[in-house]
Image: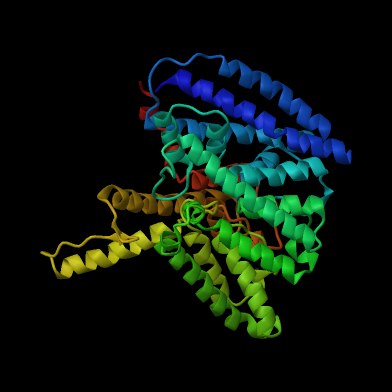
Amino acid sequence: MNKRIIINFIGKIILIEVMLMILPLLVSLLYGDGDTAGFLFTMIPAGMIGGLLMRVRQKQGRMNSRDGYFIVAAAWIIISLIGAMPLYLNGGFPTYWNALFEIVSGFTTTGASILARPEELGHGVLFWRSFTHWIGGMGVLVFVLMVMPMENDNSMHLVRAEVPGPTAGKLVPRMRTTSMILYGIYTAMTLILIFLLVCFGMPVFDSFCIAFGTAGTGGFAVSSAGIAGYGSLAIEVILGVFMLLFGINFSVYHLIMLRKFKEAFCMEEVKVYLSIVFLSTLAIMFNIAKMAGGFGHALRQSFFQVASIITTTGFATVDFELWPEFSKHILVLLMIIGACAGSTGGGMKISRMIILTKSFVAEIRQIINPKEIITVRLNDAAVDKKTLDSTRIYVAAYMILLCLFTLIISLDGLDFTTNFTAVISCFNNIGPGLAKVGPMANFSVYSDWAQVVLSAAMLTGRLEIFPMLLLFARSAHDR
């Protein structure tokens, strides 16, 4: 492992985080809520540490994939440890571990919270809490590569380790240009959303925070009433549409920019994604129509919740814990499936589900006709054996870790539904679960140590398992 490259890059990441804290610092100064000291006491020492680490000179040589995975996992842990300090120092959280859970939930765009009344926090802390959704949505390392470029071969290892989905590629030959394109699209969509929310009556501060959560598919609200508190059909429709848009692979938007409309609209993953949304919305609408007071209200509720859950945003306008079992089962399945690869959404990803389904069918056909050569195809292109193997290994690791995390937090003594959906929620970066962690509840029911375990689940899920596992593998530290 090239320790000098790793230390130098971690220093850059810490400095970038300090720079990003300037925005919430300015918000705290603007509103005068008393949050300023907490940010300054975090930014000054963190900036000094980051500066010292950056002074470590890099040896000649290239970063390998092992270094890239290590940097990504270490970086996400470090920015979480530092990012939690303003929340803790400003007194909004009883313990540092509570603050850490909250900020990990922010950076991983999970949206799970321990707060019953977030409106009691100062504006600076509320802004930072939601802003972490926006930072983590597209990827911390992707942002760093845009601001501080490095050798293209080196940067690709970082992107492969951080970008969600079975594959990670470049939109254009230069990785920095790819990062700028991604963040350009991401920023433009976020600004359009903020503008629309303000136009339809949402307060400016709320519009920024909710837009950050929508863009990053996070889900932190700024009040205990959540999205339902605005009481606006227009706002719910706008948020529902934009959640779905941010759940689409961003390469689709790049193809549209290049006027390659046929390629963009013929992407198989997007077709399946929208089909699942349509069918799930209809199924839930018919199932809840009677209790919702008619098909109109049922459609409004089902569309918003399906869009929120499949994109792993986690906003809620109703207590779906009260819905019939059929509808709740659909939501749990959507939690697992998730959004498209290369989007800001979490979950297993639609592309993985397509590959798994097609490989299952191919395996059956191969048993029936052993001599036939069967190829799994995605978007009319053959899926290579490496991608097939990595997809199967990912799913196996996913199931093992899901069971393991559920078993560990069961020591807290809560019921199975609460524990299982809490782990699914955290591991897939969704936010609400069912039972005692439902949409109208929060994660304060868990002890500090259980919250640390769930924080680990959030990080493991956001980084797609392997970077976190390699961080603690002994062989990964050998020269």
- The quarter holding residue 155 reads top left
Task: Choose between 475 and 183: the one closer to the eye.
Answer: 183
Q: Is residue 200 above or below residue 152?
A: below
Residue 278, percent from left and from top: 52, 74
- The quarter holding residue 243 reads bottom right
Q: Is residue 396 above or below residue 47?
A: below
Q: Is residue 249 visible?
A: yes
Task: Choose between 430 and 378: the one closer to the eye.
Answer: 378
Q: Is residue 111 visible?
A: no
Residue 255, percent from left and from top: 46, 54
The residue lying furthest to the front in this view is 259
Count of numbered labels shown in the rendering: 0
Q: Is residue 323 above or below residue 262?
A: below
Residue 349, percent from left and from top: 45, 57
Task: Choose between 342 and 286: the one closer to the eye.
Answer: 342
Display colour scheme:
rainbow
The residue lying furthest to the left in this view is 371
> For this view, does 145 lie left or right of residue 99?
left
What quarter of the picture does the C terminus occupy?
top left
- The residue positioned 61% from the left and 33% from the top of the image is 79
Task: Choose between 16 and 301: the one closer to the eye.
Answer: 16
- The quarter holding residue 245 reads bottom right
Residue 462, percent from left and from top: 52, 46
What quarter of the picture does the N terminus occupy?
top left
> For this view, does 424 lie left or right of residue 439?
left
